[in-house]
Image (spheres, rainbow, N blue to C red):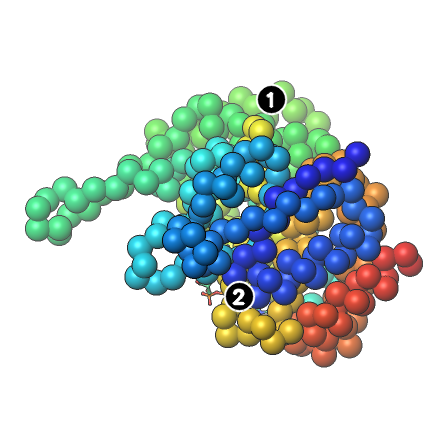
Amino acid sequence: MITKVVLIEGDGIGLEISKAVVRILDAADAKIEWIPALAGMAAFEAFGEPLPTATVDLIDQHKLALKGPLTTPVGKGFRSVNVALRQRFQLYANIRPAKKIPGVDTPFPNVDLVMFRENTQGLYSGIERWVDEEKRHAESIAVVTRLASEAIIEAAFQYAVDRHRKRVTLAHKANILKLTTGLFLEVGIEISKRYPQIEFEDLIIDNMAMQMVINPARFDVVVTTNLFGDILSDLASGLVGGLGLTGSANIGKEHAIFEAVHGSAPDIAGQNKANPTALLFSAIMMLDHLGQNECSQRIERALMATLADKNDRTGDIGGKGTTSSFTDAVINRLQK
Ligand SMILES: NC(=O)c1ccc[n+]([C@@H]2O[C@H](COP(=O)([O-])OP(=O)(O)OC[C@H]3O[C@@H](n4cnc5c(N)ncnc54)[C@H](O)[C@@H]3O)[C@@H](O)[C@H]2O)c1
């Protein structure tokens, strides 16, 4: 069955890496029909708004999107399209795997963890205000509900079961933020009892951050609230070589958007230098989500082998390849 996926190529290097990913998925015979749509700077220039209704409607209709990085112009005052999409489609789970890549040297061997971040609440609920007229006192409200906590924690446990993972670690600050992250921990403990085959532990966020640097290989599936997850998921990407090497999924009950987490890299845009790996990992996650596992595994094997080859990988990770030669090299390895 062919699945229709809305493709937002994005801005800057988004154009190059999206074309690379489409070429690779087509060559791998992924059962995808691409529906092009605009967002970000490209949409702003074409329609005067960064997230046109037509794009939102297409995602609503087809339920799935693959999105390249978007430029957020400084000072033009438009809200983050990424945040708007997460809220509009209630994409409550942000999932970011971080896995050691052969040939990419880091001080951290054997990292293979998956971060589940609650994507709609916490301190990012957007409830902020000035307390006084002089604007010397501001406050933000962190929102944590049982329903949203259950959704993300359940998703993390279910993922652990489906992927034969062993342990779920819940990161929190329930010793200080007793009501909000306390509720999140309470829900985690309850849900863990329904998954006796999965080991469960909870760690206070500051200890968690230290443990991730001292011994990241001990982590398997990690689940946490929005702000902590935002920080820890970038930390996790750093453990395996940076944001250019990790994919990302935003999953809701009905819709899912897969995206690269790096930006539009205007400094190298249009120069055939961009590394398509992050967007390709996101596309691999999308194929898994669609049940096209044979295809996703074939692409992942070809990608890993290409990254391991210094002649093929791109300059940002010490290789000699260009965007197009890297793409060719992945395609050439697809059948092997
Ligand atoms: N998810 C998103 O859409 C997203 C995320 C972050 C930043 N942005 C936007 O991107 C624009 C540029 O932001 P920035 O410069 O802070 O961050 P950036 O991620 O675009 O670039 C940071 C550095 O990393 C390099 N880089 C990034 N991705 C790369 C890739 N795939 N291959 C090779 N090198 C890569 C760039 O060349 C640059 O040197 C801004 O408008 C920002 O708002 C968008």
**From what the image shows, is residue 149 above or below residue 314?**
above
> Is 70 displayed left or right of 293 in the figure?
left
Residue furthest to the left in view is 134
**Residue 84 can be seen in this image:** yes
Ligand 1 neighbours mark 2 (CB distance < 8 Å): yes
Q: Residue at x 56, y 38 (%)?
A: 58
Ligand 1 neighbours mark 1 (CB distance < 8 Å): no
> Is 43 displayed left or right of 63 in the figure?
left
**Residue 185 can be seen in this image:** no
Which residue is at the front of the view, 175 or 68?
68
Residue type marked 1: Lys
Q: Quadrant of the C terminus?
A: bottom right
Kindly indicate the quadrant of the structure image that contains residue 254.
top right
Residue corresponding to mark 1: 193
> Is 195 displayed left or right of 119 in the figure?
right
Number of dots carrying numbers: 2
**From what the image shows, is residue 310 above or below residue 74?**
below
Q: Nearer the viewer, mark 2 or mark 1?
A: 2
Dot 2 falls on a residue whose secondary structure is: loop
Could you tell me residue 333's position as x and y percent?
Answer: 86, 62
Q: Residue at x 79, y 63 (%)?
A: 330
Which residue is at the front of the view, 208 or 59?
59
**For marks 2 and 1 on the same chain, the one whose residue lies earlier in the sequence:** 2
Residue corresponding to mark 2: 12
